[in-house]
Image (spheres, rainbow, N blue to C red):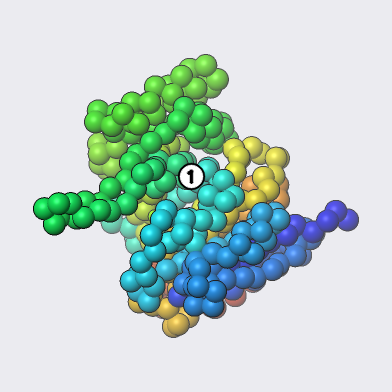
Amino acid sequence: MSAPFKVLALGGDHIGPEVVVSGLAVLRQVADQFGVAVEVDEDLLGGASWDVHGTFCTDAVVAKARAADAILVGAVGGPEWDGIRIDGPITETDGLTRLRIELDVYNALRPARAWSALLPRTPYRHEVVDGADLLVVRENSGGIYYGEPRGREVLSDGQVRAFEISEYRTQEIERIARCAFEAARGRRGHVTSLDKSNVMESGKLWRETVERIGRDEYPDIELRHLLMDYALFAVARAPRDFDVLLADNLFGDLVSDLIAVVSGSLGMLPSATLPAAAKAGHPVKGGLYEPTHGSAPDISGQGIANPIGTILSVAMMFEHGFGQALAARAIERAVDGVLNEGLLPPDLGGVADTAAITQAVLRRLRQDTS
Ligand code: IPM
Ligand code: MG
């Protein structure tokens, strides 16, 4: 038997650890059912790390993450730590961001689809959303999040000036464009690239570069460009018209929350953030898998968080981290089955708690392959 896949689980804060418990239960069972050997280690991230170590992400966690085949993250942050002021880049003030940079996971894949059982939970008419299936490919290690200089200063008139810059280099755009085109090849063959090339220099370079990569390397993929403001309207109005949405770090952050509307709740959305393009049959080592939602301090400790975003992130881990697409499909089928049973968490208008949903997914998985 080959060496086990090493998984590092970082629950983070508030509902983060609650949903990671669910994710790990699914991970262990599916690994068992599909004969995949996994070895799990757990550690702290975010406020939980701050409270113990005085930093949001320790060097030891970075070293473990570098050695891992896949990292499962819950969610980080909360009001307890909001007031902590640290001078310096965002990698010092946000543990998850440090991890993303240290691992150079630039390819954030954030899918959202309409689940038939959840159509009535969306604000859409059935015929507008039924069948919607979107993938945001978000550049995740550059742009305005990390441009230098950034900071704040007190001006001579007493005002405070705070600033950051949006910058992209050709190669950063080329590599994420390829990720989007590769993803589109495994889907419906359509990429929409989002930018503000009408006002931003980095947006102009973005559009030219994506256009060139598409023309020279992916003539089989249909590419169109939309300005980000109009794109938000167009995606919200007719989500079924879109397949892959390619965006920079900031715009990708925004549009990935927007597409959650087709699923009915942010709690449904998984993500995989990889240090390479995802290609079928080529497992990528060192990817970060996390639900798109935040740490939801308002509901933490009650055991009612929706674990499905994390469970679907584990499905993405099987597919992209371990090269086990069939296991990923089995997890998605189990989730679909549970939703069809009418077992819904509070964010989708139901009363099922985290443990009940997790148990139901595990039960469906056992029934599926046995
Ligand atoms: C996300 C989050 C993060 C981001 C925050 C928590 C730094 O919103 O992963 O979408 O802005 O990238
Ligand atoms: Mg976000």
**Viewer-nearest residue: 249 or 125:** 249
Q: x, y (%) of residue 128?
A: 32, 45
The amino acid marked with disc number 1 is Ser
Residue lying furthest bottom in this view? 302
Instruction: Report the residue that reaches farthest toward the front.
Output: 156
Instruction: State whether residue 1 appears in this view.
Output: yes
Residue at 52% in and 16% down? 216
> Residue 190 vs residue 225: left or right?
right
Q: 49 and 76: which one is in front?
A: 49
Ligand 2's quadrant = bottom left
Position of residue 358 in the picture relative to residue 80 (left or right): right
Q: Secondary structure at mark 1?
A: loop
* Residue at the farthest right position: 1
Relative to 8, is 2 above or below?
Answer: above
Which residue is more in the foreground, 322 or 162?
162
Q: Which residue is mark 1?
A: 141
Q: Is mark 1 within 8 Å of ligand 1?
A: no
Total labels: the figure holds 1
